[in-house]
Amino acid sequence: MMHVALRRVYSRPFYVVLTVITAALTLSVLLLLPNQSLLFSILLSPAVSVASKVVFFVSLHGTLFSNFTWFTGTYTVLIAALFGINASLLWFYVSRTRQVTKTDSTLTFTGIGGFVSGLFGIGCAACGTIIVSGFLKLFGIAWLLTYLPLHGAEFGVLGVILLSLTTYSLAKRINDPLVCPVK
């Protein structure tokens, strides 16, 4: 069932391009987020040449292999890929059902929820999860993450699970006919 919907959507080149661009941008954001202050200071510095800024920007994408463990790196790439697939499936579903019926907003919110949950779990091996630990530091309780079995990586796993469920739901809806069955 899932492969039928994916074949149906990805038989059109637009959706392949949409998936690749969305996944690449998402992965880029997820990799650059932990280094945002350094990135802004280099990119806004008049002392650094434009060529050096571009090289630095591209080199920060290598943090996937140096700052992330295999586990956090894997779910980071999975979140980006699933988010790209979700964007394409949702676009296909909405464009197909726009004239016929009202789109189910729960699918959109589950996909966004999966991405946001995955975003909470992004971080490197040294500093842990960026957003959650930063939020907990405001209240002086960042040490709570050490009591979780995966030290905050649970949020990334939850993001992958939610995005997978949304992908499955979207594929199922794409395969469903737009009209009620005849009895």
Image: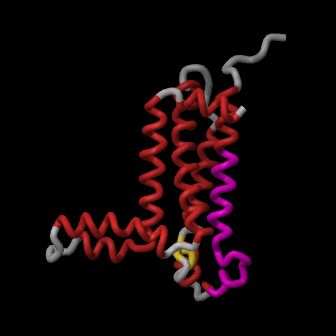
Q: Is residue 155 magenta?
A: yes
Nearer to the camera, 128 or 66: 66
Residue 14 rendering spot, x and y as whole percentages: 44, 32
Left or right? Give the position of 70 relative to 47. Answer: right
Q: Residue at x 26, y 74 (%)?
A: 42
Residue 120 rendering spot, x and y as whole percentages: 57, 67
Left or right? Give the position of 92 relative to 141. Answer: left
Q: Is residue 155 above or below residue 136?
A: above
List the single residue furthest toward the right. Answer: 183
Q: Is residue 93 above or below residue 155?
A: above
Q: Residue at x 57, y 56 (%)?
A: 79
Toward which corner of the image does residue 144 lie, by quadrant? Answer: bottom right
Q: Residue at x 55, y 66 (%)?
A: 73
The dominant secondary structure in magenta is helix
- On the rendered image, what quadrant is the C terminus found in? top right
Nearer to the camera, 102 or 178: 178
Q: Residue at x 69, y 35 (%)?
A: 2
Residue 160 rendering spot, x and y as whole percentages: 64, 56
Toward which corner of the image does residue 121 lie, by quadrant? Answer: bottom right
Q: Is residue 160 above or below residue 146?
A: above
- On the rendered image, what quadrant is the N terminus found in? top right
Q: Magenta region: which residues?
A: 143-166
Q: Is residue 114 magenta?
A: no
> How many numbered circles are shown?
0
List the single residue furthest toward the top. Answer: 183
Q: How is the image coloured?
A: secondary structure
Residue 138 rendering spot, x and y as whole percentages: 54, 83
